[in-house]
Amino acid sequence: MVNVKLWVRSEPFDVSTIQMPPPAKLTLPNLLKLNMYAKSKGDAGYPRLSYPVWEHVACGKFKISEELAWMYFETFDMVAEDSCTTQLEWKENFAKCATDNEIERMKADISVDTVQFILFLYIQQVHKISLRESLVGGGEEWPTKNRSPIDLDRKGMIGSKSLDEHGQLMFVLNHLEDILELVTEPDSYSSGLGGVGSDPALTDEAVHALGFLIAGSLDKRSVNDLQELAVISSNGDGYSKLSRTWSFRYLKSWIRSYLGISPFGVSACLFSDGLRARSGNNDASGHGKADILDLSQSLEDESSKLTAEHISKHHDKHETTLQGGPVGGRIIKNTRYAPPRNRLVILYQICKQTVAKAGDHLIDVNIKVHRCHYSYIYLLAPVWSVTLEKCHNSTIVLGTVRTTVNVFGCENVTVIAMCNRLTVSGCSDCIFHVCTMTRPLLFGGTGNENLTFAPYHTHYPMLDAHMLMSGLTPRINEWNNPLLLGHDDESHVFKEMDPGAFFTFSIPFDMKGNTKVSVLTATPLN
């Protein structure tokens, strides 16, 4: 018997879903109509959807603004395997556009996978508020008051929505029939699989497109194409070689039978860490020795080291105690065994410490920083995505981020980052020194207030090399052009930093590299 393991990919939910209720007309019936309309437009609509076709439907039929239509399209392209807008050459040419006509011509040249884009639009429903489902299912659909950033009674637990693999799994299981319907050929409802019966059919291409949401493996060490796994697992059942189509009912049953938690996700990392802790590799505080954050081991790259001045300056902070015990945080990771795009590093419960990480093992990993307080955290590497959640009174310095920096529920945090996109939700009294290729997204209805924006103002020796690896450039920076979504009163949400308060931030490490000065030649503050 073939040992197939399926799981929900976290990236579409963590990186590409917009943290707000979707537009009212972004519903299943309308997405089915979008699929049929795209196919009627020939090469401009199917199998790849051009931006002009999407803009026409989004603005004319879904009543979405032009800037929101582009935001959805650009967000999906950012995580697509064949992304165009994340290519450095495209970004620089786009930045050179002097007129609206030039901008529209460049947008018109972009296309995305039609079926996967429709799936991307559908999963925006994960942030839809439903009073009925909340009452019937007992779920936490209605927004609740934010808890205190320090929750010592739940120390060590990670229960946020951005880390909630179980919630993502249940969303896919509860909406699996709708998801399969979106990728089903419309005319197959009348003919059925192989022309017999009423069971709709899905093409091989449709099953491959499902790989945007669902991943799988045979050995829990690699990721296989979903369509290939279906062929191996089916042993000929539910598949017509004549028409190269799959039975709707068979696929639904097969996915439900094998879908579970990712072997490379947060839960697997926490479980693995728990096994190591119980194996006896513990110190007096109960933490695994390999996970204790130690200044003397903080930079893992052998070519990097902390300066003596910095160690002396922060040594007392490292020894600080809280409630009578040593302050210990955890770093949990799967980078030694997880395949690309599934590598994960979690930092949580770091309190009153200075932590620095660098090295090739962090290239293109997904980083989650959770419930860190009164700390300085340096993550100087070209990473894939970063999520900062429920942190306060801390400074977090990131290297380059290929996709998105998501900041949720933080208070009095300074974030220094160069990224493709920044999103902020439920944050207050935070400062963002950023170089971002796209407009920062500030979500309304979440408690965003008193945010300060300023340009990126630091450098480290490997920055130029990391920018090239992440497809970023200092010549494009939308730091002072945020897109406010759902805010009724914008006056209290954000402001630009007073030029008198702007100073260069010095990273206190010696590292090998060619970047000797700031990559920003001028400070674009008025």
Image: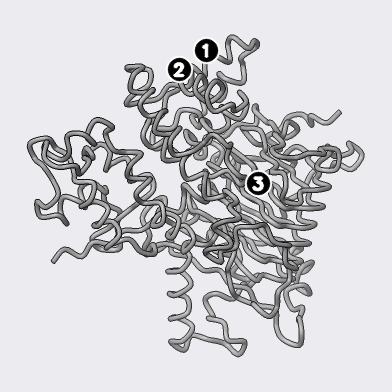
Which residue was labeled with disc 2? 109
Instruction: Name the residue at 44% across, 39% down.
Output: 28
Q: Position of residue 371 (x, y in %)?
A: 67, 66
Circles 3 and 1, Cβ within 8 Å, touching? The answer is no
In this view of the protein, which residue sits in the foreground, 468 or 328?
328
Q: Which residue occupies the extreme right position in the image?
A: 500
Q: Earlier in the sequence, mark 3 or mark 2?
A: 2
Give the answer, above or below, for where 292 lies relative to 265: below
Q: Earlier in the sequence, mark 3 or mark 1?
A: 1
Q: CA distance from mark 3 to mark 2?
A: 36 Å
Q: Quadrant location of the N terminus?
A: bottom left
Instruction: Name the residue at 61% across, 14% down.
Output: 97
Give the answer, above or below, for where 17 lies relative to 76: below
Q: Secondary structure at mark 3?
A: loop
Q: CA distance from mark 1 to mark 2?
A: 7 Å
Could you tell me the amino acid type at mark 1?
Answer: Arg
- Quick check: can you spot residue 400? no
Q: Secondary structure at mark 2?
A: loop
Give the answer, above or below, for where 236 lies relative to 355: above
Circles 1 and 2, Cβ within 8 Å, touching? The answer is yes
Which residue was labeled with disc 1? 105
Number of other residues with Cα within 10 Å of mark 3, as a class: few under 14, some 14 to 19, many 20 or more:
many
Q: CA distance from mark 3 to mark 1?
A: 37 Å
Q: Position of residue 443 (x, y in %)?
A: 69, 43
Instruction: Name the residue at 38% across, 37% down.
Output: 116
Which residue was labeled with disc 3? 460
Give the answer, above or below, for where 56 lies relative to 410: above
